[in-house]
Image (spheres, rainbow, N blue to C red):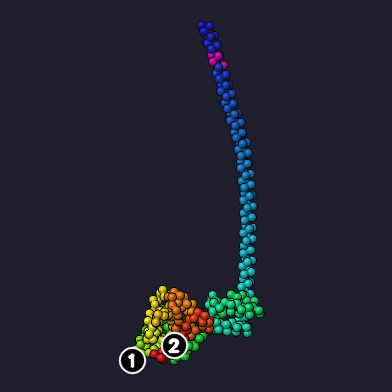
Amino acid sequence: MARRSKSGDIAGGLLLIAAILLLLIVQFIIGLIVETAITLYNAILENLGITVAVTTLCLLICGIYLYKQKQKKNALLAEEELERQKKLAEEAEVIQNRSRIIKEFSKSEDYILVKKYAEKYLPDKYFTTRHIFLEFVKIIQADWSIESEDIGELILKEREVFEYENFVKKLKQYELHTYVDYLRAAINAYGDDIHSVIVKLYFYLRENELLPSQSDKDQIIHDINNLLAIIRKENIRKSLLAETNQFSLSHIDLMNPYDFETYIAHIFSAQGYSAKVTKASGDQGADIVMEKLGEKIVVQVKLYSRPVGNKAVQEVVAAKSYYDASRAMIVTNNYFTTSAIRLAKPNKVELINRDSLEKILRSI
């Protein structure tokens, strides 16, 4: 019994020692793990700090670069805006100076030259009388620092005033009371070319409060067309009831272009020509093509309220070539400009003006 008890004590002691050793080993392992974890954590924190520091530095550098770039761009924009404002100010100053000079010139005695030029020549925005215009500009610029474009604008403005004043003078030659009286007066003054002065007629009637209520330019055109039709019927009636079937120049002035062409063709037919009125489109510059004894003649017919210019001469010369004609002729109820007469002579274009046409009418 004593031996068994002793053996049991030894076994229990060994188990206790084993348990203690195991506990120490576990504690050591746990301590080692904790120490390793702490070391690893510290290493991570240290590396993370470096990463954060590097990242922060990079961001700071980028921020500084972008800020500098923005400053540079803003400075460039500010410089461009300053340059633009400076340019605008210079342009405004130039415009002000031009306006001041033009205003002073308009009040000077020399301005009468612009008015006389506008009255003598028929300018347009392209200034077909270019050589005359350039000479005129030199005269003005000898004493005034005015651009040629400004001189041209002044001439066009004065031409509009001149034409409007002449328009009003023509109207006032007639006895005028009613709206229809004014329309009839305009037709009598301008004939079939009445449509070229519709705007002037409209403004005159409006300014003098002569327009019917709610009337506009379209209404005036409509009323004029109706009145033209009535006048033409009256003229035809008078001609038919007259002893001779002859139109006077006053009747011709109220014709439309096609009726005038037809009437001229009728006159030449009465003189033995085979006369044919061409189509309105594609006539190649000839309103009438006629033949007699194998001779072909092209005729340009112009129903105008103003002198016929170079363009008609150029057109009939082209028509002469196109139709292979031997002669070319222009007939008008008006007259011809000096330049048209000069151009017609070397091109052998026969010109029949108002006076010549009247003689022809009297002879038939």
Residue at 62%, 54% (x, y): give it: 70
Q: Residue 229 at what x, y percent from top left?
A: 37, 84
SS type, badge 1: helix
Main secondary structure found in the magenta portion: helix
* Category of crowding for the residue at label 1, using alpha-carbon neighbours closer than 10 angstroms: few (below 14), some (14–19), many (at least 20): few
Which residue lies under the disc numbered 1?
241
SS type, badge 2: helix
**Dividing the image into 4 quarters, which one contains the C terminus?**
bottom left
- Residue 170 position (above or below residue 152): below
- The type of residue carrying mark 2 is Leu
Q: Residue 28 at what x, y percent from top left?
A: 59, 23
Residue at 62%, 44% (x, y): give it: 58
Q: CA distance from mark 1 to mark 2?
A: 23 Å
Q: Which residues are magenta?
A: 12-17
Name the one closer to the observer, 255 or 140: 255
In the image, taking residue 84 as reference, residue 344 lies left or right, namely left
